[in-house]
Amino acid sequence: MSKEIEDHRNFNQSGNEPFTSIMDKHMSRRGMMRGGLGLAAMSMMGFGAGSALAEPDARTGVRGTGAPGKKPLTLAFESIRGAKLDSVVVPKGYTAQVLIPWGAGLTSDVPEWHDGLEMTPEIQANSIGMHHDGMHHFPLNKGSESKEFLLAINHEYIDQNALWAPKGGPTNARSGKRPADEVRTEINAHGVAVVHVKKQADGRWTHVVDSPYNRRITNASEMEIAGPLAGSDYVKTKFSPDGLLARGTSNNCGNGYTPWGTYLACEENWPGYFVRNTDRQLDDDRLGVSRGRGRYGWETAAGDASEQDDEFARSTPTPLRPMPVVTIATRRAPTATRSRSIPTMAAAAP
């Protein structure tokens, strides 16, 4: 999470017990149960508590290594010394490389990223987004799980100064109307990417350009609303009067995956993207919906001659009724798609 968007204010002014307190109790209770069950299981298998908590071995000083010929476990690589280097340091025999940084093209018609490349909505919609966060790998074939897979990855937020470095920074970042195409580009730098990743014969990794698996889901992508909420009055909007569609996903931080092979992207700090100056509800203040100007000022592009389907005006919503917090999980069809955000992957040297 960026310091620019981090917000530690407590918007829950109710007398309800905080979730962190509930979680702490649950984790503590679960840990005690696990410990008790573990000791019980060891006793049933002939490893009583006495042997589990035995004194350290006289020869090695390590517990549980008293049997002849046994040695303490060791790491499969040499540990590295602490350092203050501005670089990635890996153990001897290992290498580290940059993999799918911001701006890496997912299709062959995207120009190769360079310091002077000025991003456009089209380029950003078909290349890797900014500030990588939660991610998960999905193997394509059994037996090659660590050589070729799909990497689903969140793009949580943007760095406007890096994004617009070739033109000296964003236009009207703090006041005035933002240019429509700058806003569209920033919208497309958010969201989620699915990238086909493959290990080459020389041990280095690459992403597969033009793979049919590559896709971007941005803050502008259409999504189908599924589950009992679909079609209800709570999600009926001007864009989707029947309450079956929504647009976009932002500030995807945490992630998860399901046993049936789908990816879960979790939004946080999303209220700052929206502005409501009049007729504010209690939940607007509780959640932290902006007043005056949104986080990146996207709403100021509303009314531009090129605007379609209120793509910018949606940042200043006027709901039909107080809105619940909802999770939209089902995705629709893909948009096939300076300091750079980079995940790194360490691999054994060939």
Image: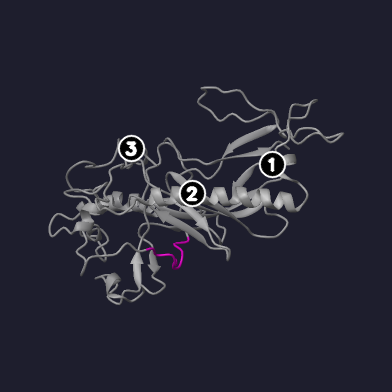
Q: Nearer the viewer, residue 8 or 142?
A: 8
Magenta stretch contains residue 328: yes
> Label 1 is placed on what type of residue?
Gly
**Residue mark closest to the camera, 1 vs 2:** 2
What amino acid is found at the position of numbered circle 2 in the picture?
Gly
Label 3 neighbour load within 10 Å: few <14, some 14-19, many 20+: some
Mark 1 is surrounded, within 10 Å at the Cα level, by few (under 14), some (14 to 19) or many (20 or more) other residues, namely some
Q: Looking at this view, is 335 or 259 the one in front?
A: 259
Q: Position of residue 28 (x, y in %)?
A: 50, 47
Kind of residue at badge 3: Asn
Quarter of the image with the C terminus in it: top right
Query: Which quarter of the picture shows residue 49?
Result: top right
Question: Residue 331: x, y in percent?
Answer: 44, 66
Asked if residue 65 shows in the view, the reply is yes
Q: Which residue is mark 2?
A: 134
- Residue 33 appears left or right of 173: right
Disc assigned to residue 203: 1
Q: Is residue 220 magenta?
A: no
- Whichever of callouts 3 and 2 sits on the residue coming sooner in the sequence is 2
Secondary structure at numbered mark 3? helix
Tell me where residue 79 sits by quadrant.
Answer: top right
Residue 147 in the image: x percent, y percent?
68, 50
Q: Which comes sooner in the sequence, label 3 or label 1?
A: 3
Secondary structure at numbered mark 1: loop
- The structure residue drawn at horizontal position 18% and vertical position 43%, both measured from the top left corner, is 175
Is disc 3 in contact with disc 1, using a CB cutoff of under 8 Å? Answer: no
Q: Which residue is mark 3?
A: 161
Instruction: Categorize mark 2 by other alpha carbons within 10 Å: few (<14), some (14-19), many (20+).
Output: some
Residue 220 drawn above or below residue 175 = below
* Start-end of magenta stretch: 327-336
**Residue occupying the point 29% across, 64% down:** 324
| Foreground label between 3 and 2 | 2
